[in-house]
Amino acid sequence: MLVKDRMSGNPVFISPETTVPDALALMEKKGIRRLPVLEEGRLVGIVTLLDLVHASPSPGASLSIWELNYLLAKLPVKGVMSKKPLTVSPDVPIDEAARLMRENRIGGLPVMKDGRLVGVITETDIFSAFLEMLGVNRGELRLTLEMPDRHGALVEVAQVFHSFGVNVVSLVVLPSDPAAAAGQSVWRLEKCRDVKALTQKLEEKGFRVLHI
C-alpha cells in the first residue's frame, strides 16, 4: 500500500500571511489539525493546531487583554509555522511514511509530486491503513501461534488451514527474541467452522496456540 492510496487529495492550504484566528477558524470548519502553507504555489511550511493554540504575542506588563487579543488577531502564521517541513511522494510505501512520522514525532506529512502539493497523509490515515492490512474488520477469528524456528513452518500452518477450508485474511509475523527458539505469528481467519478441531490439529503439528 502506497501513500497515494491513503492520503487526502486536494488538501486545504493557507498562505504565510493568513492570520492565526483565520487559520484556526479554517481548521475548525474543515475538521482538520494541520495546514500546509503555500507561497506562489511553493510549500514553505506547515502549521498545526497546537502551533496555533500556543501562538501569542510576547506578553508585556503595559498591554491589556484587549491589546493582546488585537495583536494576536494580526499575527500571521508565518511567525508560528514549521519551515521546511518533511514531505513524502505519493509512491512512497505507507510504512515508510509511518517510520518518518514516528522518528520525527510528527502527526502528518505533506505529499509532494514534481514540486506540487498533491495531498496530506496523517497518523489517522496510517492507523486506518494498518487496521485494514491486519484485516481487523474482516477476519472472524484471530489466532496467535508460537512458531518453531524451522524452514517452511508458515507453509505448514497454511496447509492446515487449507485442509480445514479456512481462508487466511491476514498474517503478521512478530519478531522473536534472538535468545528464544520460537517466534509468533498472528493470523486472521474466516470460514472456520470448527475452531477446537483446528487448534488441536495445529498443536499436533507442533504449533502451540497462544491466544484465540
Image: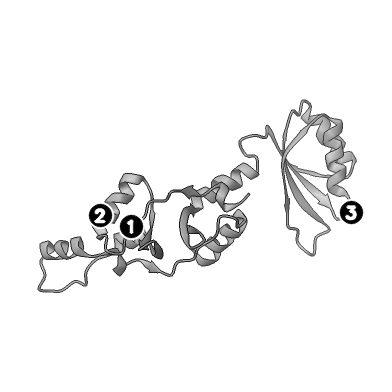
Query: In 3D space, how far apart are the residues under numbered discs 2 and 3 (Cα atoms)?
Result: 60 Å
Depth-wise, is mark 2 or mark 1 nearer the camera?
1
Label pair 2/1, CB-CB below 8 angstroms? yes
Give 33 or 92, whichever is nearer the viewer.
92
Could you say which quadrant of the image residue 37 lies in?
bottom left
Q: Give the labeled residue for mark 2.
A: 22
Residue sitting farthest toward the top: 193
* Residue nearest the viewer, comparing 12 with 103: 12
The three-letter amino acid code for the residue at tag 3 is: His
**Nearer to me, 187 or 201:** 187
Q: Quadrant of residue 212?
A: top right
Q: Amino acid at mark 2?
A: Asp
What is the distance, in whole Å, between disc 2 and disc 1 at their CAs? 10 Å
Q: Which residue is mark 1?
A: 14
Q: Residue at x 55, y 48 (%)?
A: 127
| Disc assigned to residue 151 | 3
Q: Residue at 76% of width from left, 29% of height from top?
A: 192
Horizontal side of 119 relative to 168 (left or right) equals left
SS label for mark 1: loop
- Residue 163 on image: x %, y %: 87, 32
Local crowd at mark 3 within 10 Å, few (<14), some, or many (≥20)?
A: few
